[in-house]
Image (cartoon, rainbow, N blue to C red):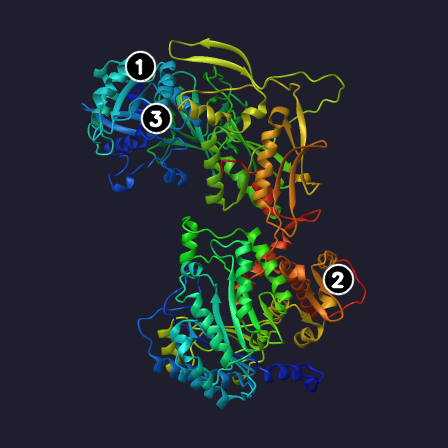
Amino acid sequence: MDICEFAVDKIRNFSIIAHIDHGKSTLADRLLEITGAIVKTDRNKQVLDKLQVERERGITVKAQTASLFYRHRGQTYLLNLIDTPGHVDFSYEVSRSISACQGVLLVVDANQGIQAQTVANFYLAFEAQLTIIPVINKIDLKNADPERVESQIEKVFDIPREECIRISAKLGTNVDQVLQEVVKRIPHPAVSKADAFRALVFDSTFDHYRGVVANIALFGGQVAKGDKIVSAHLGKTYEVNELGILTPDEHPRDRLYAGQVGYVVAGMKEVKEAQVGDTLYHQNKPVEALPGFKPAKAMVFAGMYPMDQSEYSGLRSAVEKLTLNDSSVTVQRDSSLALGAGWRLGFLGLLHMEVFNQRLEQEYNASVIVTSPTVPYKAVLCSAKLMKNRRAVQKNMVYIDDQRVMMKYLFPLNEVVVDFYDQLKSLSSGYASFDYEDAGYQPADLIKMDFLLNGRPVEELTTIVHKDRAYSTGKFMCERLKDSIPRQMFEIAVQAAIGSKIIARETIKAYRKNVLAKCYGGDVTRKMKLLKKQAEGKKKMRRIGNVDVPKDAFINVLKRKDK
Amino acid sequence: MTGYWVSGHMAIQRHLLDRVSAFPSQWPFCLRRCSYCNFNKYVPRRVDNAAMTRCLVKETATLLRLSRVARINSVFFGGGTPSLASPSTIAAVLETVSQNAHLPNEAEVTLEVNPTPTGMAKLKDFTEAGVNRFSVGVQSLRDDDLKRLGRDHSSWEALKAISEARTLCPGRVSVDVMFGLPGQSVESWEGELERVLDVCDDHVSLYQLTLERGTQLFKQVEFGEQTVPGDDVTAVMYRTARRILENRGFLQYEVSNFAKNGAVSLHNLGYWRARQYIGVGPGAHGRFVPQAEGAVQREARTQTLEPDVWMREVQQVGHGTRRRTRLTQLALLEEVLVMALRMTDGLTHQDWAMFNPDAGLHCILGQSEDVLELQERGLLILDVRGLRCSWEGLALLDSMLPTLLFHLEKYISNQEKQKEEGSPSLCQGGKSKTR
């Protein structure tokens, strides 16, 4: 089917949005099957989720796109389905995908009903003024209560219940009707082939042979192979090497037209050159950039170190390769006395970080130590008294509507980097959202805390904490140390100290008897194995005063609590 | 012993080989399993005594011939409960030993005894079969403790057994006792030990109850049905036991073994002095050079554990050896070190030289800071006699061994590297600081 035959009024651009596990990806599979884009088999379960980690965890990490041909009442339509990640960590990506659409299918589980992401995604679509088609899924399950959910939708979203479509994506029930409604209710894109070329980048991947492959939605004009295009964000010019549509596999074409969705390869070397939300236009024909572009903002930070310094370059290349395809990870080199050279990485959320780690281990065989990150401090040497600060100072509070309130606080970054975001989400069942901006450096009551073993300081563990946190951090680390250092022939005092003042202490008891009772012929074999292992362990120990500390001890003390 | 000393390696090896001490023989059957036991033991419905005997005899002959050993200094019947075996089995095995090597009249022949009435009745017959030493498994003299441990005898029976054994083999009876039992306190332990010492002979073996995974007692403790004393308490129990035994005239010669009037266990000394031994029977262990195959290196050997399978193998090929591992020079030296340090006399320079004539203990271990530190702390002694633990150090031996093994390995691998590079260096006399 030749693409240029499609009049803009036969094009529909839509997305599927939903709370996690409500059946977004299954519905996408069904739509692909019905329109013949994929052959109906059992193995099509969630075709669009390509990454191993996605398949394992049953989540979508990278958005995929497919152009479908649908015949309705004697007419053929071009339906562009843009799959979106369902997780809260990726809401920015969702908002960009949505801006390429004119409508969305809002999928709600017939038993669970409206959940946090249902609401969040609804607002994204609502604020973008898209047509919203509510779809109630999983009606095949025993506990399904579509009537109740329809009432919910009417009440919360103010959408008449008659507009809901009840389906079972798994069984295919009523899915055909969904496609019909897409054609009927969602407007065609209000664009014209005659306008200047203007396209939105809503996703990009990195291909080793071709470079960056950008997924674009054309908001005007047309673009062809060989054209020179410009990225609004960076101002750089590229030549289009290849372009086409996705079904979801790539189908190269000579030309793409306004209202269509597809991919383009244009000699970009890094995904940072094709950032989500960016605008593309023809060289010498600049256009107004599409609104809503934001560079990705990291919310959760962690330190990452190789297990052993000898693995540093292997880990570095793995991190580089992974971030090639994920421009939302912020990377900064860092180093720790105990663990050597590593990085401080920023992620969109905890899931993002976990997926990143898992991919590091699975795809690149890297074993990584994950720590709470260090936060930059500036020490001010002055004799003036330091200003007293509460940890978080409320700045203002605004009611957005009768259901939402926005609160602004001033936080020290330290309080926020590790797990604030995660706790906020879990405390509010996912409903609360969070954004931040740098408010500069502020003076604070910070102190240096040392750790001592039988009076000798352990350099690697010296840390800077806020006065209010000193005791709890000190106690926690002493306990971790106690659990990580094996007993020796004398008592070991583990202490946390501020200056000369001891603020926390744990004791590791001495062995008073440590000898095997029976050792006759044959017993020695088993005993030797254990002794040899302990002798090997001696090689990796660090001597602090008279205490032998295994290398693992540092890792145990410094790593993130949730790992 | 000095008569055999000729310069050169071969002579020393011959010396070692000629004097194979030990001949441990396994009778792995018991009437029931004690709650703390994790040895290779079986509780069968019935035992085919005749078949077992035939197989023990066959394996004995095969392995003696394989080792080409000239003389056996001691034979030990363990298990299981060897006192369940018939005296004729014992006699048959001893007969086979003397047919395949020289078994002198004064060789020590020990039988482990479980002090039940059935065992008792046979003691005299055992002596007539050739046994001249008994090791009685008393464990405890408190009936409630015995019950808790799943033992199948009473304290009265145990006392009777000791008395009977002493009559038959005066001065040659050993008694096993355990501390760290559930419900024991330091005071109750001290009282019990004193009672044992009132009735025992010239040799006492003292063991701490250890919880082994997979035993009934382990599970009971895990589920809170029983509790055992904490390690601070057992440390005190061991300490006071050593003092009490010393006060009563016993000399501690090994971590767990005490003797009066020189009544040490020759057989066990053989283990700790790393002499060769040939293990026969299901689950038995051996350390010898299979010279008949042309070997010159010592092997660590284990016989098949399961009695039925073991018997089949013996019938088919003459012995049921499940594992054989050649010991490298380093592995051999490691065993020498680990075993010898368990003795209060420790590792003499002469004994060490038998295994490693090239470099002495001062050279290999005396140079390191770690070892010097242990000496300074009064735990380890390295002097003209050799290397040994102090009284305090003996109780902490396993904390010191990894360090010693670390330095031993370092020395040996350095020597090997230098040999490859063609520049073997002799030990320097002076002390250089190495870690």
Label 1 Cα crowd, 10 Å radius (few <14 / some 14-19 / many 20+): some
SS for tag 2?
loop
Q: Which of marks 1 and 3 is nearer the N terminus?
A: 3
Label 3 Cα crowd, 10 Å radius (few <14 / some 14-19 / many 20+): many
SS for tag 1?
helix
Labels 1 and 3 within one chain: yes
Which of the pair A459/A408 is nearer the observer? A459
Identify the mark at residue A10; answer none if there is no mark: none
The x and y percentages for residue A261 are 37, 26
Q: Which amino acid does label 1 sit on?
A: Phe
Q: What residue type is labelled 3?
A: His
Residue drawn at x 40%, y 49% as measured from the top left: B223
The quarter of the rendered structure image containing the C terminus of chain B is: bottom right
Q: Which residue corresponds to mark 3?
A: A19
Q: In this view, does A272 lie above or below A553?
A: above
SS for tag 3?
loop
The x and y percentages for residue B75 are 51, 80
Labels 2 and 3 within one chain: no
Residue drawn at x 60%, y 85% as measured from the top left: B18
Quadrant of the rendered structure where residue A377 is? top right
Label 2 Cα crowd, 10 Å radius (few <14 / some 14-19 / many 20+): many
The quarter of the rendered structure image containing the N terminus of chain B is: bottom right
Q: Which residue corresponds to mark 2?
A: B367
Quadrant of the rendered structure where residue A495 is? top right
Q: Which residue corresponds to mark 1?
A: A157
Which of the pair B84/A101 is nearer the observer? B84
Residue drawn at x 38%, y 20% as measured from the top left: A120
Give the residue at the far right of this rendering.
B430
